[in-house]
Every structure is written in C-alpha cells, then in structure tokens.
Image (tube, helix red, strand yellow):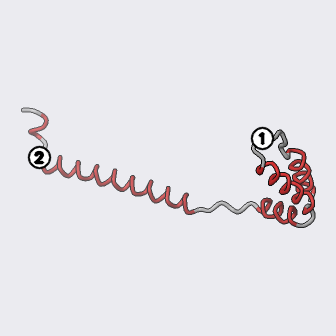
Amino acid sequence: MSVLSEVPAEEIEDEVEDEVEEEVEEEEEEEEEEEEEEEEEEPEDAKEEINENCANTKCKAYKQEFDECTLRVNSRSNTTETCQQELFDMLHCVDIC
C-alpha cells in the first residue's frame, strides 16, 4: 500500500488549504507593512526654506546678480559665460545667513 493511499484525501485538502491561507495572510501582512512605510512621511527639511528666505532677503543682491547673469547667458546662443562666480557668491551668502 502506498503512503498516499493511507492519508485520507480530506486531510490532504485541509493541509493544502491551511498552507494557502497562511501564505495569503503573510502576503497581506507584508502589503500592510509596506503601505504603513509609504504612509510615513519624512519631515520637511527646514534648511531649504531658510535658504530661500535668505536668498530673497539678506542675499537679495547676490540672487539678483545671479538671475540677471542667467537670463543673459540663456538669451545668447554662443557664449562662454557660465555665471559660476555669481552662483558661488549667492550660495556663500546663503550658507552664512
């Protein structure tokens, strides 16, 4: 007599159903955990807002120079100007603000 014939078919079906249910429950738990992780929002970086405020107040002159340079460079099709120094000046001012 084979091993399969000794185990009733109902027991095999019950075991398979239990295993499938366990797998489904595990997958649902994993999905819930992933959703919870996605829902957790990272705190906003206040530095960006502070830098923007500084650029528009204390460093306004540097920002204006950089903006004017950027407009000038973008309006030309062939130029070697990069506005690098204007950018560095503005960023330095914002950093020490």
Displayed quadrant of residue 59 = bottom right
- Which of these two is toward me, 85 or 72? 72
Say left or right for 9 vs 26.
left
Amino acid of disc 2: Pro
- Which of these two is toward me, 13 or 66? 66
Residue that sits furthest to the left in the current view: 1
Residue that sits furthest to the top in the current view: 1
Q: Residues within 10 Å of mark 1 (few under 14, many from 20)?
A: few
**Which residue is pictured at 92% across the width and 50% down the height?**
89
Q: Secondary structure at mark 2?
A: loop
- Which of these two is toward me, 76 or 14? 76
Give the distance between the C-alpha atoms of the residues marked 2 and 1, in whole angstroms: 85 Å
Displayed quadrant of residue 78 = top right
Q: x and y percent of residue 14 in the render?
A: 20, 52
| Front tag of 2 and 1 | 1
Q: x and y percent of residue 28 in the render?
A: 39, 57
Q: Secondary structure at mark 1?
A: loop
**Which residue is pictured at 87% across the width and 58% down the height?**
63
Quick one: quadrant of the N terminus?
Answer: top left
Mark positioned earlier in the residue sequence (2 or 1) = 2
Q: x and y percent of residue 61 in the render?
A: 93, 61
Quick one: quadrant of the C terminus?
Answer: bottom right
The disc label shown at residue 8, or none:
2
- Marks 2/1 in contact by CB < 8 Å: the verdict is no
Q: Is residue 32 above or below residue 9?
A: below
- Which of these two is toward me, 43 or 2? 43
Q: x and y percent of residue 67 in the render?
A: 83, 57
Q: Which residue is mark 1?
A: 78
Amino acid of disc 1: Asn
